[in-house]
Amino acid sequence: MLAFMVSAQNPAGFRMGKTTGKLPYLEYGPGDDRLGGAKMTYLDSNILVTVTDSLNTDYIVRLSANHKAFIPKENVRFRDSGIIHPWHLSGNWKIYGDDRYDYLSVFLPEKLPYRSYMQLSPARIAIDIFGVTSNTNWITQLQTAKEISRAWYEQVEDDVMRVFIELKNSQHWGYHIGYDSISNKLIVKVKRQPPSLDLKKMRIAVDAGHGGDNVGASGVTSRITEKDYTLRIAKELEKQLKKSGVKNIYMTRMIDTSQGMPERILALREADPDFLISIHLNSSSSDTIRGTSSYYRYIGFRPLTAAIHHRMLELKLYDFGNTGSFNFALSGPTEYPNCLVEVAFLSNPEDEKRILDPKFHKAVALKIQAGIQDWLKSLKK
């Protein structure tokens, strides 16, 4: 356990720190599995955190009177001193837009932690800002905002302020939360629906799972590796998209190279795609388990994954499901809709035989493309 010094400024003996490193994040608890613990949110850097204790490789942080979270120790740097304030008061809000995005800004006295989630019918972004008591007395919305329909807040607890952002379109196209670099202003950047839902006019990101020293799963009979065949299928998807007229495609990798998840996420954030398709091959300890599946983390991104999964089943693959709340790194970003496709099981002899066939790669690419088209068509109704 971490030892804490009790002081007059900090009678509870807590320590004040700031978030640091690439893509710091909070977890709900100390649980763990092969994908890591259940993540609450990614955070910006230099966010104030109140460390109350430690457990193994994590610090336990106090978000509010009734909320705590876990953060990797490598993502915290301590301050030499600091006072724990009994409250932080929010200032006024502004909603506006530029030529590509809408923005909501909230004035705060400190860079404080937050978490967000998506809601449906109507489409909304909800954000809990921890340690905040409202002193927001007006919310100004300018006509330059095109995607944000309206915004408001509820003081759901004495020190938790919940921000609601209602969208004009039913589909969530993504958002980014962070602080202004020169102030404590929290800024939510909301992506607008693309001006055209014609696939040929959109920017598509395709990720070939694994690569380099991260080989992924292996075949049950042939000993082929996941990293090689995800790249083959991803390149086939790129080929079929180009044949249909798509010109703006971002590939996370085109060769067998090692690339960590933080690097992929940051590169994708820079590429700013309209949506992401990540190709993987599944594996199980039992060679009888087989089938295709698709994955999403946020409910607002489910429609894309469900449409692709429906089309993949036309390949006469077993239905292994459309799965949500998936704690995979590339499913974590909120900036763009994303779909992880587990094409089939390398650990199943029947699935593996199909994975080895280049004709199957083309069939998979065409079904993924058809699913994307189905999704876009549904948004035009």
Image: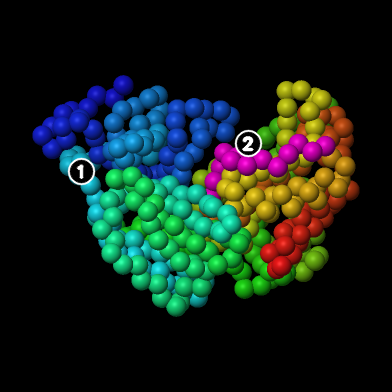
Q: CA distance from mark 2 to mark 1?
A: 47 Å
Residue at the (31%, 67%) spot, across then down: 138
Which image quadrant: the C terminus? Answer: bottom right
Question: Which segment is the magenta one?
Answer: 318-333
Q: Which mark is residue 86?
A: 1
Look at the picture and state if 245 lies above or below 271.
below
In the image, what residue type sits under mark 1?
Pro
| Residue 81 place in picture, x, y as percent | 17, 40
- How many callouts does the rendering have? 2
Quarter where residue 239 is shown: bottom right
Foreground residue among 263 and 57: 57
> In the rendered image, is residue 258 in sight?
no
> x and y percent of residue 187 in the render?
39, 61
Say which element carries label 2. loop
Left or right of 359 on screen, residue 3: left
Which residue is tagged 2?
214
